[in-house]
Image: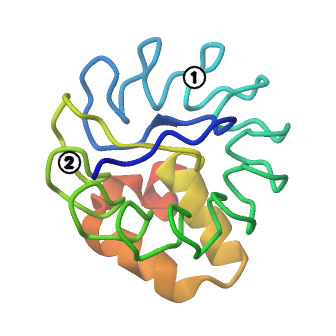
Amino acid sequence: MSKPIIEGLITWPRNLSTLRGGGLSTLRGGGMSTLRDGGMSTLRGGGLSTLRGGGMSTLRNGGLSTLRYGGLSTLRYGGLSTLRYGGLSTLRGGGLSTLSGGGMSTLSTDVYRSNIPPLPYFLRELDARGYKREAEMIRYYLPEELWPENFFN
């Protein structure tokens, strides 16, 4: 079983690869790209957009939504789900997996994709909203330079 493609859900690369198309790449299509539809763009369809479907949106399918598929949802495929393919899952395809297709993988193939904002921003939002346990889980796997207290300084 592979991770399903959810209609209407905008996603960006969110793994630890710095290569083209990776979660830490600043090139077009990368998770840290500020270009249109990029993982760190503030424009509609971007990972830092507050508009519907954006990474910083609390609306349906948004990266900070608590609704199904949202970045703050604990339901299946949600950003705070520990179930298979969830953002806090360590299983293959999960957001905390270091295996190919996982969110903590450094590989440039089978790149993990998610609707959450870039991890430093997501962690900052988790901390601000009181999701301490969830933020600690992500920090355990995430390189310290991507922790908000280091990334934004």
Q: Nearer the viewer, residue 54 or 153?
A: 54
The picture places residue 113, in percent across and down from the top left corner, at 43, 40
Query: Of marks 1 and 2, which one's residue comes earlier in the chain?
Result: 1
Q: Nearer the viewer, residue 144 or 37?
A: 37
Look at 23% across and 67% down and name the residue there: 91
Q: Which mark is residue 27?
A: none
Is residue 78 in sight in this rendering? yes
Residue lying farthest front?
A: 1
Q: Amino acid at mark 2?
A: Ser
Is residue 153 in sight in this rendering? no
The residue beneath circle 2 is 105
Q: Residues within 10 Å of mark 2 (few under 14, many from 20)?
A: many
The residue beneath circle 1 is 38
Secondary structure found at label 1: loop
User: Tag count in the figure?
Assistant: 2
Quarter occupied by residue 137: bottom left
Secondary structure found at label 2: loop
Q: Amino acid at mark 1?
A: Gly
Q: Estimate the spatial distance between the alpha carbons at disc 1 and disc 2, rounded to whole Å.
A: 20 Å
Look at 28% across and 54% down and name the residue there: 93
In the depicted structure, whether residue 69 falls above or below residue 72? above
**For this view, does 57 lie left or right of residue 149?**
right
In the depicted structure, whether residue 22 falls above or below residue 67? above
Quarter occupied by residue 123: bottom right
Look at 32% across and 52% down and name the residue there: 103
The picture places residue 55, in percent across and down from the top left corner, at 67, 44
